[in-house]
Image (cartoon, rainbow, N blue to C red):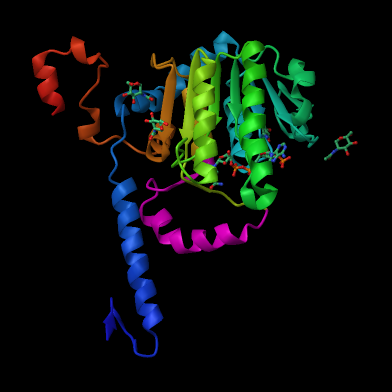
Amino acid sequence: MRVLWFNCDCHSFPGVAIAVATLGIFWACLISIYDLATVHDAHTIHSMASGREPNLERFQKEGHSAFVVGYTGETGKALVTELNETKAFKRVVLIGRRQTNITEKLGEGFEEKVVDFDQLENYKDAFEGCDVGFNTLGTTRGKSGPEGFVKVDHDYVLKSAEIAKTSGCKHFIHTSSQGSDKNSSFLYPRTKGQVEESLKMMIFERLSIFRPGILLCDRQENRAGEAFFRTILKPIFYFFPTAISTPTEVVARAMLNNAISISSGNKTELFENKAIHMLAGSLKPKTSEMVKPDKKLPQDKTESEENLEL
Ligand SMILES: NC(=O)c1ccc[n+]([C@@H]2O[C@H](COP(=O)([O-])OP(=O)(O)OC[C@H]3O[C@@H](n4cnc5c(N)ncnc54)[C@H](OP(=O)(O)O)[C@@H]3O)[C@@H](O)[C@H]2O)c1
Ligand SMILES: *[C@@H]1O[C@H](CO)[C@@H](O)[C@H](O)[C@H]1NC(C)=O
Ligand SMILES: *[C@@H]1O[C@H](CO)[C@@H](O)[C@H](O)[C@H]1NC(C)=O
Ligand SMILES: *[C@@H]1O[C@H](CO)[C@@H](O)[C@H](O)[C@H]1NC(C)=O
Ligand SMILES: *[C@@H]1O[C@H](CO)[C@@H](O)[C@H](O)[C@H]1NC(C)=O
């Protein structure tokens, strides 16, 4: 029997044929769902990416300050590198549970503050004066157990956001996840979704939610289960780089581009995996995605504009 381009003795290895076929179908589904997805509001997102240079110049002159929680993580490290290279903020407070002395290797304006996340209300001064806040905090169920996961990804994140808000944070930039859904019956997407909802209810002047797919980086620690999936999915990461994965540097670049941009007017800006690539400037919008340059409410639309949308 032939399986794809292999001649395979499938009487002795029926499992191989089934596995190959299942994998093929699985890939095809994933790719068609995610890679063909259109990016909503591509015009706004693209202009945030293409405006990086002038935005950076303006933003630097305005003299903003930021804090980063989760700066020792993979996404956090990439973000710190981006902040160090662009010098977008006059002051950056790195807030974490342990001292790393990373500021010795960074330019001016970086400070490291060690806090106890279980008693964060005693560390309010760490957040003081930061008008922008980045959150890249997170753990996994495998690493911390279900309660530990909720404690970090839900409680610590919301507590940080709450204290940040009362300390003057105007723009909160949060790392969520692809598939995040407050109604999910699975713990991970449900927790991520609930946090998004709670953040929306805090009513920051501006809230940006990033929903990356699988994060690509040279991770120090070993996560056995994850490593297996990453190996299987490698061809997709390679051939469809914006479909279900994002390198941490791309997330960091997108976050920075968003932070320095002028608000699009949306109280909440939501960036799915593909939009993150576009926001970082590594994916150009399709012509069909650029059709709607102006954001008018439906009742403001003329008939010809409505036709254009169809
Ligand atoms: N990994 C993925 O493929 C993926 C995909 C989609 C979304 N995300 C989400 O993206 C975010 C960033 O992910 P990542 O992979 O960059 O994270 P990461 O490398 O695991 O880093 C996690 C950060 O959270 C901190 N942290 C963890 N447990 C803590 C605790 N108990 N108390 C205080 N701080 C704690 C870590 O500090 P220490 O260094 O001190 O441990 C570190 O700074 C997370 O919210 C994650 O859920 C991840
Ligand atoms: C950070 O610096 C302090 C003071 O020099 C030192 O005591 C501590 O061990 C350093 N920590 C790390 C993680 O390098
Ligand atoms: C931060 O930027 C400075 C230059 O401004 C550079 O010398 C240093 O190596 C950078 N640090 C890191 C960790 O990238
Ligand atoms: C979640 O459930 C609520 C009702 O419990 C419903 O109003 C809402 O539309 C659901 N959201 C999603 C994203 O399915
Ligand atoms: C801004 O809001 C509009 C209307 O709700 C939405 O269609 C669009 O996708 C939003 N843009 C971003 C970047 O979230």
Magenta-colored segment: predominant secondary structure: helix
Can you give x and y, in whole percent of width and height, for residue 53 in the image? 45, 22
Pick the front one: 289 or 163:
163
Q: Is residue 42 left or right of residue 143?
A: left
Counting from the top left corner in percent of width and height, residue 217 is at 56, 49
Place of residue 292 in the rendered image (x, y in percent of width and height, measured from the top left) = 22, 23
In front: 289, or 3? 3
Residue at image location 57% in from the left, 26% down from the top = 86
Where does the N terminus fall, quadrant-wise? bottom left
Specify whether residue 244 is painted magenta.
Answer: yes
What are the residue bounds of the magenta stretch? 221-249
Please identify the quarter of the rendering in which residue 115 is found: top right
Viewer can see residue 56: no
Q: Can residue 123 be seen in this view?
A: yes
At 34% from the left and 90% from the top, the residue drawn is 11
Q: Which residue is drawn at 24% across and 28% down?
A: 290
Please identify the quarter of the rendering in which residue 237 is found.
Answer: bottom left
Quadrant in which residue 93 is drawn: top right
Q: Does the magenta stretch include residue 277?
A: no
Question: Which x, y percent locates residue 55?
Answer: 46, 18
The residue lying at 60 percent from left, 22 percent from top is 133
